[in-house]
Image (cartoon, helix red, strand yellow):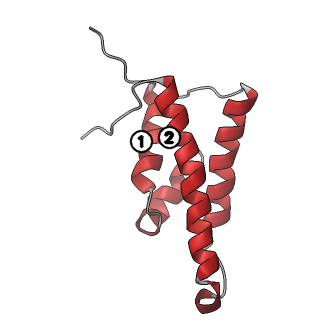
Amino acid sequence: MSLQRARSAEEYVEWIKQAVFEVGDLRDCYDFQMEELGRYPTFLEPLEQAIKAIYQSMVDGDYCFGREDLSFMELVSRHGDDIPFAILLRRINETHRKGIDVDDD
């Protein structure tokens, strides 16, 4: 089964913005539970940095689609059950690797 890809550049950018929001929200959730947990999960900081780096490359006009997985995919593969928005990240990666899903009509 193939993952859904963004149908426009605007939708893809919105997905990236959503991922930035979601990773910040996840950090906020851990902040709220910090007294119980004692520390952040090891995947959180590199995940947040990778997502923000992609967004920044878009802002700077340096973003390029590619055939390789995005850097955060290793974290998604290992910690996907702990990342509530893992499917969004998989869709972003699928679009990055295969491009925008445009109709041929």
Q: Is residue 60 visible?
A: yes
Whether tag 1 and tag 2 are in contact, CB under 8 A, the answer is: yes
Q: What residue type is labelled 2?
A: Trp
87 to 81, vertically: above or below:
above
The mark total stands at 2
* Residue to which mark 1 is pinned: 91
Residue most extreme to the top:
105
Residue linked to disc 2: 15
Is disc 1 surrounded by few (<14), some (14 to 19) or many (20+) residues within 10 Å? Answer: some
Q: Where is residue 55 in the image (x, y as percent from the top left)?
A: 65, 40
Q: Give above or below for 20 relative to 103.
A: below
Residue 96 percent coordinates (x, y): 50, 32
Q: Is 64 drawn above or below residue 43 in the view shown?
A: above
Give SS at disc 2: helix
- Residue 3's label in the rendered image is none
Outermost residue to the right: 60
Q: Position of residue 101 (x, y in %)?
A: 37, 23
Measuring 38% from the left and 33% from the top, which residue is drawn there? 5
Residue at 54% over, 49% down? 19
Name the residue at 60% across, 47% down.
71
Q: Which of marks 1 and 2 is nearer the N terminus?
A: 2
Mark 2 surroundings within 10 Å by alpha-carbon count, few (fewer than 14), some (14 through 19), many (20 or more)? some
Q: What element carries label 1?
A: helix
Whether residue 70 is visible, yes or no, is no
- The one nearer the camera, 87 or 20, is 20
